[in-house]
Amino acid sequence: MVSRTPLIDKLSRARHILQEMGSVVVAFSGGIDSSLVLKLAYDELGAQAIGVTAVSPTFPAIELEATQRIATEIGACHRIVETDQLEIPEFVLNDASRCYHCKTDLYSLLGGLRREYAGGWIVDGTNVDDLGDDRPGLKAACEWGVRSPLLEAEFSKADIREAAKELRLSNWDKPAAACLSSRVPRGITITRGILSRVERAEAALAQEGFRQYRVRDHGDIARIELAMTELPDLMRPDRRERLAAALKQLGYHFITLDLEGYRQGGISLTPPA
């Protein structure tokens, strides 16, 4: 449980930061971090706060549905813009700078939109826990002058979940999500076919009721990562057989279960073949 008084102080600081901005364009993915930013921004700025979701082949359709639902729940204006990172050669190469090129594409889109809002700020859901990760996207954010109210107010991920719960956001306990390209090992060219196959494979896991999962694409091998608490559920023969059949229909020859379970950045931990 997050300590009550510090959380109250952090919420107050975040609200004050947003008030001073006057108008904001929120990079809104539908995840808990950006949802809290949009909620606080709308509470403080009303119509001067807008959530924008960039839809592309790397963005799962199931996540788009979530953004629309949460934006409606909050009451904020929600814009959907289309882009295609697969048209960016540096992104498709899938090297260590992939996220930098993705975020640069996103912020350039949002930069165009903010002119409609009296030159308002672009804001995102970055928090203090993100600073310990290898995140080239943070460099892009800095270059585009993106501000992070939760980071400025010193929110941790635990703070965000507790605040979202208190503010009655329905996705307060939503598992972490990431773009589909994060399922592809670095150095392997990202294609529309790979992204579509991963999306359909993960949809099969969602249909079976799993919450925290990844399907890492290794050519003809699908490596499934699940939260450790969910690993035993996959061992039910009927469920295991259904999932194996579904993933083989997508073109995978071998279906493997990672015994270390789900972990962020799991694809980058894999040594090259």
Image (cartoon, rainbow, N blue to C red):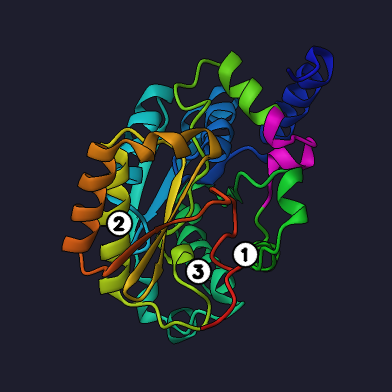
**The residue under label 1 is which amino acid type?**
Gly
Does the CB distance between marks 3 and 1 fall below 8 Å? yes
Q: Residue at x 20, y 45 (%)?
A: 242
Q: What x and y, as percent, mark residue 71?
A: 39, 32
Q: For numbered disc 1, what is the local secondary structure?
A: helix
What residue span does the magenta drawing correspond to? 147-158
**The residue under label 3 is which amino acid type?**
Cys
**The residue under label 2 is which amino acid type?**
Glu
Q: For numbered disc 2, what is the local secondary structure?
A: helix
Check disc 3 and report the residue beneath it.
102
Q: Residue at x 59, y 27 (%)?
A: 40
Mark 2 to mark 1 CA distance (whole Å): 22 Å
Q: What x and y, as percent, mark residue 231?
A: 46, 39
Question: Which numbered disc, 2 or 1, marks the residue that appears first in the sequence?
Answer: 1
Q: For numbered disc 3, what is the local secondary structure?
A: helix
Q: Nearer the viewer, mark 2 or mark 1?
A: 2
Q: What x and y, as percent, mark residue 9?
A: 81, 21
Rendered image: mark on residue 137 = 1
Question: Which numbered disc, 2 or 3, marks the residue that appears first in the sequence?
Answer: 3
Q: Residue at x 59, y 59 (%)?
A: 265
